[in-house]
Image (spheres, rainbow, N blue to C red):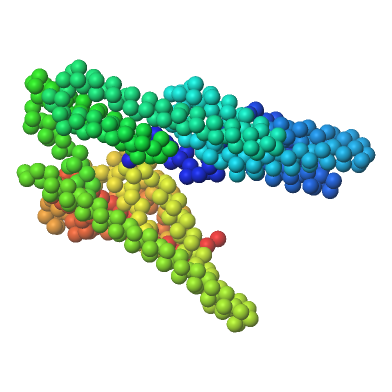
Amino acid sequence: MSSMYPAAARPDSGRRALTVLALTLALVATPLAMPAYAQSHDSPLFEEADRLMAEAKDVHADVLAPESFDEATRYYRRAEISYERGKSDQDIIKDLADAIENLRHAIETADLIQTELDGMLAARADALSAGAPEHAKELWTQGNRAAEDAAEAAEERKPGRAREHGDEAIGFYRDAELASIKAGFFDETEALLLQAEDERIDRYATVTLARSRALLAEAAAALEADRYDTDLPRTLAHDALYEARHAFRIAETALRVDRRESTVEAIMLEAEAPLTEIAGVFDIVPRFDDGYAQVTAEVVDQFETLTSEHSILEQALVDCRNHRDELELRLGELEEELGGVSEERQAMERRLLAEEKVRERFVQVEGVFTRDEARVLREGERIMIRLVGVQFDSGSDVIEPQYFGLLTRVQDAIALFPESVVSIEGHTDSYGTDGQNLALSMSRAEAVQQYLVANMRLDGERIEAVGLGESEPIANNETREGRARNRRIDVIITPNLDAVMP
């Protein structure tokens, strides 16, 4: 469920909120730019000041303690100018001492704010994420004023006053967050519910509107019960807004039937279309004569299977990496045992490097094509380019000019693997006789082969054409989408590992 808070802006603690605040919004004043101290000098006189300047920047002292930081910057720059003009070390050391003192003060202040005012920073970040500057301007402004007072007290080394103003700021920020959440979700939902009453939408979406009202009431109760825990009410309010909008959509569809602008049959067929498209992706033949349950179950089952396979593949990848690490460790052991680099070790190293090069170039090949043009797969060391974007007219083996650009990118992919062996596989759907399909798939594969040989000047022995007819389908031939996927050209590249290495 999405929420009005971006994921990165929902801090779990004040320390996370600190980064958001310190990097984007100053609590008091915009600081001067950090001096260009890296580096107009190479004198050891500046070492301590340089170290503290970097530390101050790391803890965001330029934002959280701007007065001390700016004063340190001023003294530091004076020391730089004195150094550049060749003045005495005594003048430079005096200015650097003042810079160091102010930097230490700035760092201490920043640390104090982080430890003592972390709750204030978290509350401010929450209010900001909820849209308080727009929806609760007065409360937001009051919170900022109190926060400025807290920061000033911290810089003056008055932790008691800093905490007092910080608690005051927290109250304003939390009130601003509450008001913003209500304005952001509640107001729009309540307006839609009033509109639904005026337009008598409940005639068509009674249950959905009732659900919206119930969720809104539950959100309001949860928000009032605990104003500092906004996750639950925010989610409930979001769901209430969705159900209100959903009710209008339902009513709009029902009114089309009432006004004779559509029929129940047309609306049901329209509703089936997206599920039909999803089923096609999973190579499922959709049947709705018994409703949606069977198709839905098959789609869910396919998705869960793919998810499981994905997990297995991820684990296999981890295992392969672990195996590679073990091999590298063993290579190191062999080197120690043999007291030098053996031929066996060199061969193993070359193979590992070659396999890594193949993986890198596989990624390059993936980037050459869009999903509408080709699917790029890897089978061990072999690279398969499934040219889903190349289509032949029924019964034809002529490559249309519109596909020349795509075949040029196939040439680029092959060129990434010097001295590789290339196989062009032709495939058809199940329509037609076995013999016809076998011959057609072969003639199409040969057409692609001849195009690549002619345009790449490849050695004919390195590239072969194979016709496989309908024998290796990748989709269901009972659907139009499945048959289109089965009518394909696969380009198989088998790399020469020795040639891959520079």
Is 212 on the left-hand or right-hand side of 329? Answer: left
The quadrant the C terminus occupies is: bottom right
Say which quadrant the N terminus sits in. top left
Which residue is farthest top? 198
Instruction: Compare residues 76 and 152 and report the one nearer the observer.
Output: 152
User: Where does residue 372 sit, x and y in percent of width and height?
Assistant: 32, 42
Task: Count up the numbered dots.
Answer: 0
255 left or right of 156?
A: left
Q: Nearer the viewer, residue 137 or 44?
A: 137
Residue at image point 48% right, 42% down: 11
Residue at position x 58%, y 26% from top?
Answer: 145
* Above-or-below relation of 312 to 217: below
Q: Position of residue 184 (x, y in %)?
A: 38, 27
User: Which quadrant holds residue 260?
Assistant: top left
Residue 355 shows in the view? yes
Q: Which residue lies at the image location 41% right of the left edge and 58% below the top edge?
A: 459
Name the foreground residue: 291 vs 343. 291
Q: Is residue 253 visible?
A: no
User: Where in the figure is residue 351, as x and y percent of width and height?
Assistant: 49, 69
Q: Residue furthest left?
A: 289
Residue 214, picture quadrant: top left
Judge left or right: residue 179 versus residue 249: right
Vertical placement of residue 201 versus 265, above or below? above
What residue is rendered at 36% in x and 33% in y? 224
Q: Please provide percent x and percent y for residue 166.
A: 57, 34
